[in-house]
Every structure is written in C-alpha cells, then in structure tokens.
Image (cartoon, helix red, strand yellow):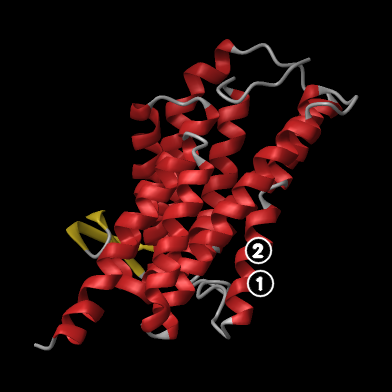
Amino acid sequence: MSKLEKQKNTLPFIQLILFLAIIIIVQYKLFMLAFTVLAIFIIYSAITGKQKRVFLWMLAGYTIGYVIFLFGDRLIELLPFHINILMILSRMLLLIPIIIMMYIAYKFNEKMNFYWTKPNWQAKISFPFIWTGFHSISIKLFLIIAISINIISFFPFILQMSHQLSTFFILFLLLFSSINAILEEILWRGIILTRLVDLAGEKTALLISSFAFGLSHLILGYSFLTCMLFSIGGIFYAGMTIRSGSIYPAIIWHFIFNILMIASGLIPFIN
C-alpha cells in the first residue's frame, strides 16, 4: 500500500477523533482552541479529496453555529418575557448551526440529509445491537414498545407533580417538545449522521454521532452519567433513522420523551 493510500484510509478515522474532540472542547467553551485545531486540519486537508474537506468544513460550521447559538442565548435572557417563552426561543436558536451546515453542504454539492424521506415502518431493527441481537421487530412495533416503556418509567414521577393543565402549560408542553425534537433530530440524526455515514459508514456513524449527541448536553448542566444515558438513547434514535431510512420515527420518539420530561419536572415549567 502506497503512502497516499495509507493517508486516505487513515484520514477518516483522524477526522472522527477530531469530531469528538471538537464536541468536547465546545462544551467547555474553548472556542479559540477549537477554531485553531480546525484551521490546521482544513489547511492540511487541502491536498485531499473534496469529500474529506466537506466534513471538516461542516464541523467548522457546527462550531461557528454553536458560538452564535450561545451568544444568542445570552441575548434572549435579556428579553422581558416569561422564562418558559425564553426556553422555547432558546431551542429555536438550533436553527443557526443547522442553516450554516446546510449551506456548506449546498456549496459542496452534497446531499444535506439522507433521511428526510417517508419511513419504511416495516423495516427490521434488532435489540440490542440494531443490526443483530436476540430479537428483531419492525420499526413501528419497536417505536410503540419504546414509547410505552418511557411512559411507564416516567409515570410515578408525573404523579408527584402538581401541574395545573392551563392553556399556557399545554402550549409550552407542545411547543418546547416539538421544536426541540424536530431541530435536534434534524441536526444530529439528519445533517451530522449523514456526514458521518458518508465519511465512515453506517455502524461507525451511529456510534460516534450518538456518543457526541450525549456529550453535547454537558453544556446544559447535565452530569456525565446522564449524558451517557442520552448517548444510549441516541443509539436507538440513530438506529431507527438508518434502518427506516427516515428521521421521522426518531422525531416522534424524541417528541414524546420531551413531553414526559416536562410532565415529570425534569425539564422545568415555571408557573
């Protein structure tokens, strides 16, 4: 194998490590370090193919978008609105990295999202390893079982809450849950998963994107253990997306999960 061939085989794995490193660095708001590392790799990748460069530019777009997201979040806190409205506006800022990354994909003439199609509900997914396991069922049945388990798990905590079913509470419940689910899934199981699949294949992309998804919650104040639980959830979100060929099953599950978190008080609603 020639030196150039070894470089082509090694570069995707280096970029995967870089991806995780940038996600962690951004969580700790070390943006100058993130941009410096990215600039070095972008210059280095100038001698490689287009597909190698597009991933680095998409990662740079994510980092830029996240910086703007955090800056916008601070500005939103200054607005004279109720805190629950501010929480909804904050989640809408996820549009910023999404738009930037979509624009970069467009400039490179790359498909923005492999999974923005009608789902194959009869496609099979296995437990616990998506492609293999002790049992395989359809995406539809898997989704019904997963949501049922979530409802049963959250039900004791929901009973302890004393929310009044006001119009404001219901609006917050629906708006926050839908906006957060749709935008996070477009970003993580849409754009980012697409680029990782293109770079390293489905199985590697599933694991790396899910681990990074969990880590991305560190900046929100969640513990590392909780973030790893989010990563496990991300594995099944990504698994459903890849096996069904669509992002919609993950959006539905994510939406219901957000509703349960609000109803149980894990995502706070302030009366």
**Which residue is the extreme one toward the bottom?**
2
Residue 216 in sight: no
Location of residue 43 in the rendering, given as x and y in whole percent from the top left corner: 43, 71
The spot of residue 115 in percent (x, y) is 52, 72
Secondary structure under the numbered disc 1 in the rendered image: helix
Q: Residue at x 54, y 30 (%)?
A: 220
Q: Is residue 115 left or right of residue 82?
A: left
Q: Answer above or below: position of 67 versus 156.
A: below
Q: Specify the farthest residue to the left.
A: 1
Q: Where, by quadrant of the figure, is residue 124 drawn? A: bottom left
Name the amino acid type tagged 2.
Ile
Q: Pick the residue in front: 109 or 64.
A: 64
Q: Residue at x 77, y 39 (%)?
A: 89
Give the quadrant of residue 266.
top right
Secondary structure of the residue carrying tag 2 is helix
Is 14 in front, or is 270?
A: 14
Q: Which residue is identified by label 2?
A: 100
Outermost residue, right direction?
A: 80
Q: Is label 2 in contact with label 1 (beta carbons under 8 Å)?
A: yes
Query: In which quadrant is the N terminus drawn?
Result: bottom left
Question: Where residue 196 appears, x then y in whole percent?
Answer: 39, 67
Q: What numbered label is drawn on residue 21? A: none
Q: Which residue is mark 1?
A: 103
How busy is the neighbourhood of tag 2: few (under 14 within 10 Å), some, or many (20 plus)? some
**Residue 127 shows in the view:** yes
Structural distance between the alpha carbons of marks 2 and 1: 5 Å
Q: Residue at x 78, y 15 (%)?
A: 271
Q: What residue appears at the point 51 percent right and 68 percent down from the top-left corner? A: 57
| Left-right relation of 106 to 51 | right
